[in-house]
Amino acid sequence: MSYIEMDSVYKRYRTGTITIPAADGVTFNIEQGEICMIVGPSGSGKSTVLNLLGGMDFCDDGKIRVAGELINDFNERRMTEFRRYDVGFVFQFYNLVQNLTALENVELATQITNKSLDPVRVLERVGLSDRINNFPAQMSGGEQQRVSIARALAKNPKVLLCDEPTGALDYATGKSILKLLAETAAETGMTVVIVTHNQAITPMADRVITMRSGRVQRITVNDAPVSADSIEW
């Protein structure tokens, strides 16, 4: 049994008389400790799949298993526990609390779990040791994204879900963050799922899932993923 399994998963959004199949029979597996990238054009269903995996949304049909548990059978309390303890989210638009400093934003996440990492050390790992007392409005978009990543990593989750984590970052910072994600997966066994439009970074993934129109088009397993240092885009 794989660590993450999606089996014939459907998610439909309805607007008036129009039904949009955001996930149209999605099936794939991800092994524990892998870096998996989900790629495809805008509207292909990538973010929908990420939200379903993290319990942020619920499928209409199919089965989603994480660590052997059927998460789409969870009641509200169990789903809250799953999101609280087992999943870390890195959102495309940061979702930081504006009246809290970088350190306080990360500390906020560590207060809801019982196995958190030291917030200061995690901020140092993402290159923000000199910005820990700054508020989001005092930081660039790239710095805010790094706070978002630090907040997710500080929870020490089993699964890290990232929606375009390098989208707001400059080239050098983007590479350093990808390297950090790879090192974290290797050191802790954390499973990392990254949604991205950037095909150039896929050689560093263990598994690449290509989507189009809500369906999985192709699954590629990289037997020898490359280092983030060697990736150019």
Image (spheres, rainbow, N blue to C red):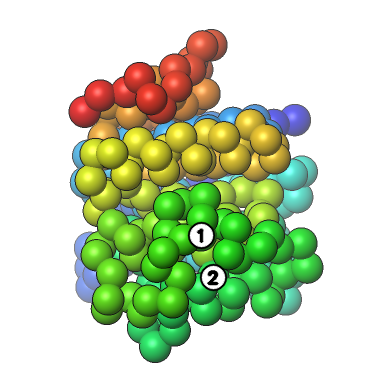
Identify the amino acid type marked 1: Leu
Confirm or deny contact between disc 2 and disc 1 (CB under 8 A).
Answer: yes
- Residue 102 is drawn in which quadrant? bottom left
Of residues 71 and 118, which is closer to you in this image?
Answer: 118
Q: List x then y, in percent, for residue 118.
A: 66, 63
Local secondary structure at mark 2 = helix
Q: List x then y, in percent, for residue 106.
A: 54, 70
76 displayed left or right of 44: right
Residue at the spot of label 2: 106
Residue 65 makes an appearance in the image: no
Q: List x then y, in percent, for residue 200.
A: 27, 26
Of residues 104 and 55, which is closer to you in this image?
Answer: 104
Q: List x then y, in percent, for residue 111.
A: 68, 77
79 displayed left or right of 182: right
- Residue 171 is drawn in which quadrant? top left
Residue furthest to the bottom in view is 99
When the figure is inspected, residue 73 is found, relative to residue 100, above or below; the finding is above
Which disc number belongs to residue 168? none
Tell me which residue sits at (63%, 31%) in the image.
186
Q: Quadrant of the N terminus?
A: top right
Local secondary structure at mark 1 = helix
7 displayed left or right of 229: right
Identify the amino acid type marked 2: Val
Residue at the spot of label 1: 123
Tell me which residue sits at (70%, 63%) in the image.
116
